[in-house]
Image: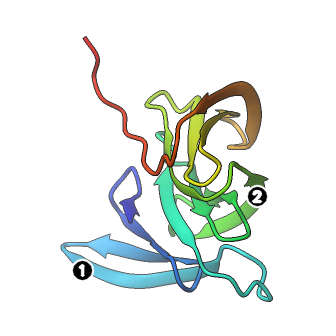
Amino acid sequence: MEFSTDKKFLYIIDELSVKITVYKYNNGKLTFVQAINMMPEDYKETGAADLHVSPDGKFLYASNRDTADNIVLYAINKQDGKLSFIERYGVSKAPRGFTIDPTGNFLLSAGQEGNAIIVFKIDKATGKLTLTDNKIDVSQITCLKWVAAE
């Protein structure tokens, strides 16, 4: 789960239903806003994994493993927190985790069964992803975190 950048909304990914649920957050209380499917209604697999809000708070990205192996992009309505589907992107097999760099310029996807980290360039105006030529081979990668380096 992750909060919106203004901390007014909470986004929760559900692995088994392959949905994202949106709640309004106020004074420690949650109020249901929306539940949105990550995949078409006829999709029967499970495997939603990770979600992140872009640093500018305009977009939400969510990963889906199983047979889908994709990252789903949504626009965030700043007024009510609701998500609107934009596009899906194929990634390395079993994208258990992914991260957005602190500048919001790149998304790195960890493909656990694909044994690779693949890098996308983020268009900050549209949120859309473009695959770069950068690929890092890492066996059974599941999680990516940014840490300060000296």
The image position of residue 9, as x and y in percent, is 40, 66
> SS for tag 1?
strand
Q: Nearer the viewer, residue 146 or 77?
A: 146
In the displayed structure, 78 sits above or below 54; it is: below
Name the mark on residue 40. none
Residue 105 position by quadrant: top right
Q: Amino acid at mark 1?
A: Lys
| Residue that carries the numbered disc 1 in the rendered image | 29
* Residue 31 located left or right of residue 118: left
Q: Amino acid at mark 2?
A: Arg
The image position of residue 15, as x and y in percent, is 51, 77
Question: CA–CA distance between discs 1 and 2?
Answer: 32 Å
The reply to whether residue 54 is in sight is yes
* Residue 116 located left or right of residue 1: right
The reply to whether residue 79 is in sight is no
In the displayed structure, 26 sits above or below 138; it is: below
The image position of residue 64, as x and y in percent, is 62, 65
Question: Which residue shows up at 31% across the image and 72% down it?
Answer: 25
**In the picture, which quadrant includes the N terminus?**
bottom left
Q: Residue extending furthest top? A: 150
* Residue 138 located left or right of residue 65: left
**In the picture, which quadrant includes the C terminus?**
top left
Name the mark on residue 88. 2
Q: Residue extending furthest left? A: 27
The image position of residue 52, as x and y in percent, is 48, 53
Question: Which residue shows up at 39% across the image and 50% down it?
Answer: 5
Q: Residue extending furthest front? A: 139
In the displayed structure, 150 sits above or below 66; it is: above
Question: Which residue shows up at 32% across the image and 58% down it?
Answer: 7
Question: Which residue shows up at 48% across the image and 27% down it?
Answer: 103
> SS for tag 2?
strand
